Image (spheres, grey):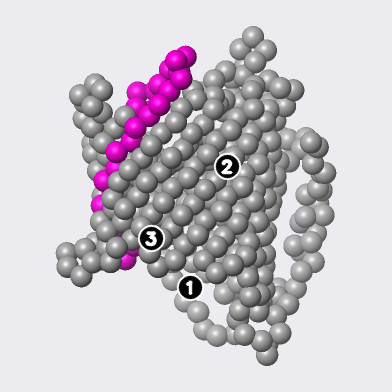
Amino acid sequence: MRIQQFSPIIFLWTILGLPFHAFAQEVSYTPSVHGVIRGKYEYQPDIDSHRFEVRNARFNFSGLVGSPSLCYKAEIDLSDEGEIKMLDAYVNYKLFDLFADSTKTKDSGRSLEFTIGQMRVPFTIDAKRSPNDQYFANRSFIGKQVGNVRDVGAMMTYRFYPEHPVILEGGFFNGSGLTNQKVWHKKLNFSTKAQFFFAKNWNLTLSAQRTKPDSVRIQTYDAGIYYQDSHWHIEGEYLYKCYADNLYNKVHAVDAFVNYDLPLKRYFKKISFLGRYDFMTDYSDGMKLSNGRLTTTDYARQRLTGGITLSLGKPFQSDIRINYEKYFYQANGNPKESEKDKFVVEFVMKF
C-alpha cells in the first residue's frame, strides 16, 4: 500500500502561518531538573548466574525561554545499560487554546504544539513510555525491539477536548535514527499517532510510520487499546511491520497485560499485581544485508511475565518491581544471553 507523500515545505509553512498566542500571567523561567534512576538485580536459573545493573540514570533539563509559549528539553542517560546516550534535545512552541471560545470550559478547548529536534517519535503505546512509566521491569518486545524509534525531525501535536478528547500527532523525521544526522535524504520519513478517548476510561491508539535505518525502507502500523480506572489497567497492542522489496518476512508482534492496584495503609502506598503475554516473529532492524536479504536481529519468541510492584510513594515515582519472565522459542531460535528466563528485582526512583 502506497501512502501519499506530504511536502515538508507545506508542513513548515503551515506552522509559520499560524498565529502565536502567549499567556499574560507571570511565569518562571528557572530551568527544572528531573530524572529517574533504575537499579536492578537479575538471576537466570538456566545458567545459575546473577548480575547487578544500573539500567537507567536519566537526567533532563527543561524550562521556558522568553515566552510562556516557548520551552525546551534536553535529556541524557548516564547509564543506559552502561552507555552514555543523548536522548532528547528539542524546542517546543505551544499554541494554547488556539480556536477556543473564552466563554467555554477548558474541556471544550483546543491546543496546538510544534516540536523540532531530537525526540522519541509519536508511535505505539508501550514504546512511548519513559522508564519510570513502565509497568514491568523489562519492556515489551514492541517497546524494546520492534517499535522503539528515536529520531531527529519536526512534529505537531493537536489536542481537542470535547466530551471525548482526541490527540493527533504527526511529523517528518530523518528516518535513520540519532547517529546519522548528517546524511542527506531524498525523501523524509514520517510518523503519525492518533489517540481517541472514545468512552470513559477507554483509549484507542492508532499509529503508522515509515523509517529507513540504512538502505531499506520499512513501513510499520500499530493499533492498541486500553482500559484504566482507579484499580485496573488492561491493555492490548498489535504491531505489523513490512520491508521494501520483500527483503525480509513480515513481522508481527503483540503485547497484552493486566495490572491491578490494591491500596495499602502501612509501609507501602499500594501493591500492584501484574501479568503479561507478548510475542514477536523473526525480526530485522533493517541495518544489514546478506545474500540479498536482511539478516535476522531477533528470533521469534513468546514470553509470560508475572510480578508485583510495591509503591513507596506516588505511583511510578518510587517503586520496587519484582518480576519473573518465562521465554518460549521455536526449535530454530537462537536466544540472546539476556533474552532467557529470568527473575528480576528493580528499584525505581523518579525525582
Of the image marks 2 and 1, the number of the one nearer the N terminus: 1
What's the distance in space between the residues labelled 2 and 1, CA to CA? 41 Å
Circle 1 sits on which residue? 29
Which residue lies under the disc numbered 3? Answer: 34
Nearer to us of marks 2 and 1 is 2
Q: Please state if 41 lies on the left or on the right of 88 as rendered.
A: left
Bin the neighbour count of mark 2 within 10 Å (Cα to Cα): few under 14, some 14-19, many 20 and up.
many
Does residue 29 sit above or below 346 in this rendering? Answer: below
Residues under numbered marks 2 and 1 in contact, where contact means CB atoms less than 8 Å apart: no
Q: Determine which quarter of the picture holds residue 304.
A: top left
Task: State which quarter of the image contains the N terminus.
Answer: top right
Whether the residues at callouts 3 and 1 have beta carbons within 8 Å, the answer is no
Q: Quick one: quadrant of the C terminus?
A: bottom left
* Percent x, y of residue 43: 23, 32
Under circle 2, the secondary element is strand
Per the model, the C-alpha gap separating discs 3 and 2 is 32 Å
Q: Is residue 196 above or below residue 137?
A: below
Any mark on residue 238, and which?
A: 2
Q: Furthest residue to the bottom?
A: 103
Q: Residue at x 47, y 45 (%)?
A: 256
Is 55 in front, or is 324?
Answer: 324
Residue 328 picture location, percent across and down:
40, 26
Question: In this view of the protein, can residue 313 be seen by the observer?
Answer: no
Upstream in sequence: badge 3 or badge 2: 3
Query: Magenta stretch?
Result: 313-340
Amino acid identity at mark 2:
Tyr
In magenta stretch: residue 293: no
Say which of marks 3 and 2 sits in front: 2
Query: Quadrant of residue 45 in the image?
Result: top left
Name the residue type under label 3.
His
Identify which residue is drawn at 62% across, 65% down.
Answer: 198
Dot 3 or dot 1, earlier in sequence: 1
